[in-house]
Image (cartoon, coloured by chain):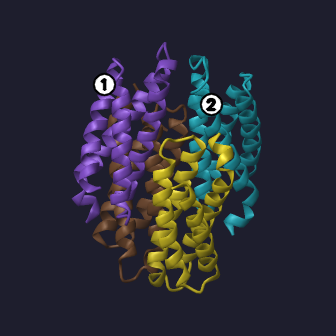
Chain colours: A cyan, B yellow, C brown, D purple
Amino acid sequence: MAHQKYQELLQTLHDCMEECNHCYDACLQEDDVKMMAECIRLDRECAEICGYLEQAISRNSPYISELASICAKVCEDCGNECKKHDHDHCQKCADACFSCAEACKKVA
Amino acid sequence: MAHQKYQELLQTLHDCMEECNHCYDACLQEDDVKMMAECIRLDRECAEICGYLEQAISRNSPYISELASICAKVCEDCGNECKKHDHDHCQKCADACFSCAEACKKVA
Amino acid sequence: MAHQKYQELLQTLHDCMEECNHCYDACLQEDDVKMMAECIRLDRECAEICGYLEQAISRNSPYISELASICAKVCEDCGNECKKHDHDHCQKCADACFSCAEACKKVA
Amino acid sequence: MAHQKYQELLQTLHDCMEECNHCYDACLQEDDVKMMAECIRLDRECAEICGYLEQAISRNSPYISELASICAKVCEDCGNECKKHDHDHCQKCADACFSCAEACKKVA
């Protein structure tokens, strides 16, 4: 069953969604918000697609592979942007994004 | 920080979302789908609001309490419907729903 | 700006999402729900991805093209399933899905 | 049927979602992003709940009234924040938010 076969991916997606949303929230509270604008934008993109894929996998959607392919791309882009910033929340988010990108590629 | 304070709730919501979506998928494959129509409907309602609240909590939304209040109600309704059916996926889903309803009430 | 350039697509997606959700609701109330199981499933898939793409376009997401490509596929699958059923809600939904698939292909 | 009874509200929600997402995108491109941080945050909150309520209404959810009540509150908060800023996108967004808040209150 989809929700068991993909148990590890579901957790990885959940963790990445959380880190992205936390990073988004923290970026909005930084002193230099302008420098974080692209990070804010990609954090949201990444949190949304991770959440969407979680739902799709757990309802046994016929489109898991196509969605995972997009999700991998968004995770990579978000990880690359976060990686540029020294904030702890950005570095943690980058790690979560790169892990999630790898996990998504396996099912894409 | 919201995403740490609510770590347990986030996991409970994630588990409930998964069980609801799995129950929805399994109900659609049952022989007597008509009998499961209300279960299918509430499984979706519950999976959606749990996923929504997960996102809201982890982005430190100002509306966590109001959303948790609705989520508790949806979880209870879904749990009560699932409880009526003997299928293993319904019983497991009911348990996840009732746990999640309790967890949501604490922050509502 | 994305939300103006895509004004027509945004409305087409909105209409398709509405028809799919209405068809889903109506299918769950039919006498023979079992016959409608695949329709219920695809109605949800289609409503979700249309709603997601609406949000993505209007926030000027960098992933509009990739998402529109998936959305076109889901709309076609949902339209083909709905087309099989004589119910008025299914026929209307099929029309909305095929229109939306065409519109999505243009930006994919 | 829900999707016909609520036709006007569905369009109002769609318009508000679009304006909020456009305002979010435009705020992230402003020179003084820091000044727009709360606007960015509330634009997202508002776009998400409007999109959620659109889906809920069109699938004939049993929770329309409760969700509309939250949506009205989020729309008001977002409108009040946007109103403070002179940018054209903020003023237009504020108008859409206040209209949507009124429409939501009628079904709450």
The residue sitting at 75% across, 38% down in the picture is: A98
The residue sitting at 57% across, 70% down in the picture is: B25
Query: Measured from the top left, where is residue C25 in percent x and y?
Result: 37, 68
Secondary structure of residue under mark 1: helix
Q: Amino acid type of disc 2?
A: Ala
Visible residue check, residue A60 = no
Query: Measured from the top left, where is residue C26 in percent x and y?
Result: 34, 70
Q: Amino acid type of disc 1?
A: Gln
Q: Quadrant of the N terminus of chain D?
A: bottom left
Q: Is residue B88 above or below residue A78?
A: below
The residue sitting at 29% across, 43% down in the picture is: D101
Q: Quadrant of the C terminus of chain D?
A: bottom left
Whether marks 1 and 2 lie on the same chain: no
Residue occupied by mark 1: D91
Query: Measured from the top left, where is residue A23 in percent x and y?
Result: 65, 33
Tell me the chain of label 1: D
Secondary structure of residue under mark 2: helix
Tell me the chain of label 2: A
Between residues A10 and C14, which one lies in front from this camera angle?
A10
Badge 2 local density, few (<14 within 10 Å), some, or many (20+)?
many
Tell me how far mark 1 sits from mark 2, CA to CA. Answer: 26 Å
Residue occupied by mark 2: A26
Q: Is residue A5 above or below residue C9?
A: below
Badge 1 local density, few (<14 within 10 Å), some, or many (20+)?
many
Mark count: 2
Number of the front mark, 1 or 2: 2
Instruction: List the single residue furthest toward the top.
Output: D31
Q: Is residue A49 above or below residue C37?
A: above
The residue sitting at 52% across, 52% down in the picture is: B52
Between residues C69 and C3, which one lies in front from this camera angle?
C3
